[in-house]
Image: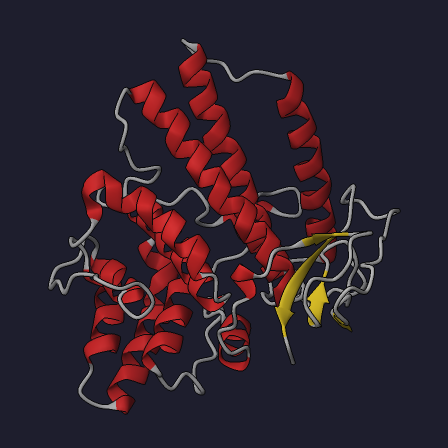
């Protein structure tokens, strides 16, 4: 990391470094150690949930630490894959083929996790990943049940339901944001939602983690779904200065028109560029640059991420 420009006041550079170090250590441990369990199926399910949760923490930590938004894209690709693995292992353990990886009706914090991931897919313009993630939730019977879930999806995925009920009261101001009579009311409800958001998740495992000190598990508190609603519905968020509001992500979504980024395959270093335009790699900070068709993609072999993979970010 070349600079530390945190997006939330509680985070320190040292905390972020500790997190990244421990993240790598846990991945290594998971290769050789097993989780305490009553069966191989339960062990696989526990492992899958742990690795998925750890990667979500990494996405949030990267954003909180002030990393470039582009660095979240490959992490999000990997995260959606981790949810698919989680669903698969849980289905085998519970003998329930279409079980959801998140119990969004029972647990507000699991619903929040769901809409955070949906929000990330929307704000990073990855409809391909959104479809994959939402399939896991829809197949478990949650489609057409919740207003916020459907209102997040209906602008980007065809054939969603119009529904006037939602699982958790915390989201009421966000529903009001979407259906407000005036632009001023919409902005006011969005701010109200941000102000009430943190206190509403008192039961969440991450609540108050910023009080644990540098060795704690705090990686940031983000109402990413609020940013996704503001982006999708053209809400004026210019006066919203609340800590949990992901303004940089919203700005990214607004300033990067939806391209076919997800349809342009990533390229390993040493391979020829498949399309003239801008590419970046998580293997090096500030790496975004223009490559010409058939130009050989460079390698940063001494980076921590074993090999260099380049991702398309657009033509201009």
Q: Image height check: is 187 above or below 111? A: below
Q: Nearer the viewer, residue 140 or 245?
A: 140
Task: Return the x and y of residue 36 as percentages of the image width and height.
Answer: 49, 14
Task: Return the x and y of residue 141 as percentages of the image width and height.
Answer: 19, 42
- Quadrant, the C terminus: bottom right
Q: Image height check: is 251 above or below 216? A: below
Q: How many labels does the image show?
A: 0
Q: Which residue is drawn at 31% across and 56% down?
A: 200
- 311 left or right, relative to 45: right
Task: Return the x and y of residue 256 as percentages of the image width and height.
Answer: 55, 77
Residue sticking out furthest to the top? 38
Q: Quadrant of residue 176?
A: bottom left
Q: Image height check: is 266 above or below 140? A: below
Residue 275 shows in this picture = yes
Q: Which residue is drawn at 36% across and 26% down?
A: 90
- 195 left or right, relative to 149: right
Q: Which residue is drawn at 28% across and 90% down?
A: 184
Residue sticking out furthest to the front? 294
Task: Return the x and y of residue 28 as percentages of the image width and height.
Answer: 69, 27
């Amino acid at each position: 990391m070349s600079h530390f420009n945190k997006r939330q006041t509680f985070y320190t550079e040292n905390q972020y470094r500790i997190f990244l170090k421990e993240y790598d250590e846990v991945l290594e441990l998971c290769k050789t150690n097993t989780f305490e369990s009553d069966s191989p199926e339960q062990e696989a399910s526990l492992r899958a949930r742990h690795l998925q949760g750890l990667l979500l923490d990494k996405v949030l930590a990267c954003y909180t630490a002030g990393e470039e938004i582009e660095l979240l894209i490959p992490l999000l690709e990997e995260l959606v894959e981790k949810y698919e693995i989680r669903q698969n292992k849980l289905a085998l353990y519970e003998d329930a083929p279409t079980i959801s990886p998140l119990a969004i009706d029972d647990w507000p914090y699991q619903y929040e996790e769901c809409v955070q991931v949906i929000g990330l897919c929307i704000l990073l313009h990855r409809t391909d990943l959104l479809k994959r993630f939402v399939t896991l939730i829809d197949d478990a019977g949650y489609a057409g049940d919740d207003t916020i879930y459907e209102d997040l999806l209906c602008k980007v995925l065809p054939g969603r339901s119009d529904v006037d009920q939602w699982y958790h009261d915390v989201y009421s101001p966000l529903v009001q944001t979407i259906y407000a009579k005036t632009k001023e009311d919409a902005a006011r409800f969005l701010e109200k939602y941000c102000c009430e958001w943190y206190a509403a998740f008192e039961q969440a495992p991450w609540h108050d983690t910023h009080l644990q000190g540098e060795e704690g598990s705090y990686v940031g508190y983000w109402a990413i779904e609020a940013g996704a609603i503001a982006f999708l519905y053209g809400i004026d968020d210019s006066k919203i200065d609340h800590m949990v509001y992901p303004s940089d992500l919203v700005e990214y979504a607004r300033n990067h028109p939806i391209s076919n980024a997800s349809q342009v395959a990533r390229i390993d270093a040493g391979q020829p560029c498949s399309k003239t335009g801008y590419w970046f790699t998580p293997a090096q900070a500030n790496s975004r640059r223009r490559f010409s068709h058939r130009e050989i993609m460079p390698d940063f072999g001494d980076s921590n991420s074993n090999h260099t993979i380049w991702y398309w970010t657009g033509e201009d």
